[in-house]
Amino acid sequence: MGKPVEKKTAKLRAEERRKVVAANILAGLSYRQIADALNISIGTISNDVKKITERLEKEQVEDLSQALRLEIARLDQLLNTLWSKATNGDLSCIDRILKISDQRAKLLGLYDANFNINVTKGVDLQKARQERWKNIAGIINAVLDDEEEELEDFADGASDTTDPTD
């Protein structure tokens, strides 16, 4: 009976630690500074940041997806309302339909430079957006890793007494 309780306690501690890690990352501290302050390894910090990023990604994708579906539904309703007038030759309705269609295409990312449609396979917009968020998270992690390496290089260089410009 002790193991489930210990497991829950460990999960709670990890969650509390992740909150502290997130706050420190937002405050601009490096992985090393956070690790030193919490007396844990940089690897643990890295894992915590990955977990935090994955959660944020998922939440943002879900929020974005919900907002996108709502906005597309609104635009579709407007298109349906104007359609019969436009097909009967009402030029102002045709103009509005073109503007609504343009907005709809922008929201769906149809004008994105990397958006390619393979007619035989179709397009999974949700998956494309998730891939885009993964790429953004990868860039953020790469920047954070580069910052950490630069700080380590700086710390190593600070102990060096030779001038690198000589």
Image (spheres, grey):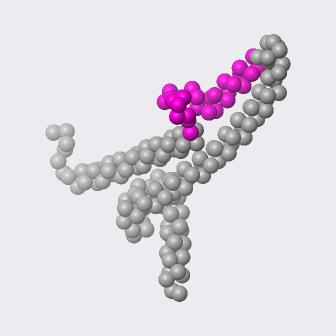
Residues 76 and 146: in front is: 76
User: At 42% from the left edge and 49% from the top edge, which residue is drawn?
Assistant: 141
Q: Residue furthest front?
A: 120
Q: Nearer the viewer, residue 155 or 145?
A: 145
Looking at the image, which residue is at 59% across and 48% down?
A: 60
Viewer-closest of 129 and 45 = 129
Q: Is residue 27 visible?
A: no
- 31 with respect to 4 (left or right): left
> Residue 17 at what x, y percent from top left?
50, 67
Magenta span includes 163: no
| Residue drawn at the location 69% of the way across and 25% of the way down | 101
Q: Is residue 16 above or below residue 80?
A: below
Estimate the x, y position of residue 56 in percent, counting from the top left: 56, 52
Q: Residue at x 82, y 27 (%)?
A: 81
Depicted 132 relative to depicted 85: above or below? below
Q: Nearer the viewer, residue 112 or 79?
A: 79
User: Which quarter of the picture shows residue 127?
Assistant: top right
Q: How many marks?
A: 0
Numbered range of the magenta stretch: 95-124
Q: Picture coordinates of residue 114 (x, y %)? A: 49, 30
- Viewed as shown, does residue 45 lie left or right of 87? left
Q: Residue 4, percent across and down?
A: 52, 80
Report if residue 105 lies within the magenta region: yes
Residue 18 shows up from this direction = yes
Placement of the C terminus among the 4 image quadrants: top left
